[in-house]
Amino acid sequence: MDTKTRNSAIAAAIFLGGFGLFAYFLPKIMLAVGNYSTVAASVIAVFFVLAFFGVFWLRGRSQRKKGL
């Protein structure tokens, strides 16, 4: 494994770990926010899903620009 692939693997692990940690606490966050506003709780869930796919979309755009 060369430096470039190792750095990519580390970055992927950090992203997946961060999203996994947030997904683990997402139900508790939504219930806490849902006590104030159900719309706000829904927005948090939608934001989580969009952010997850947004990271991969941005990565794909970056790779296409680099020609990889």
Image (cartoon, rainbow, N blue to C red):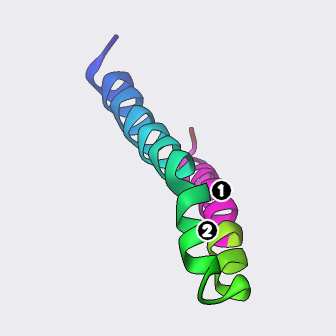
* Residue 40: percent from left, percent from top: 64, 85
Res 57 label: 1
Using the rendered view, name the quadrant where residue 36 is placed.
bottom right
Residue occupying the point 66% across, 89% down: 37
Q: Secondary structure at mark 1?
A: helix
Q: Is residue 66 visible?
A: no
| Horizontal side, residue 24 vs residue 42: left or right | left
Q: Nearer the viewer, residue 63 or 25?
A: 25
User: Pointer 2: what residue?
Assistant: 31
What crowding class fits label 1: few (fewer than 14 Cα within 10 Å), some (14-19), or many (20 or more)?
few
User: Considering only order in the chain, which callout, 2 or 1, is on the residue closer to the N terminus?
Assistant: 2
Residue occupying the point 53% across, 45% down: 24
* Residue 18: percent from left, percent from top: 42, 46
Q: CA distance from mark 1 to mark 2?
A: 29 Å
Residue occupying the point 60% across, 63% down: 51
Residue occupying the point 50% across, 52% down: 25
Q: Residue furthest left?
A: 3
* Residue 60: percent from left, percent from top: 62, 50
Stretch in magenta: 47-67
Residue 62 on the magenta segment? yes
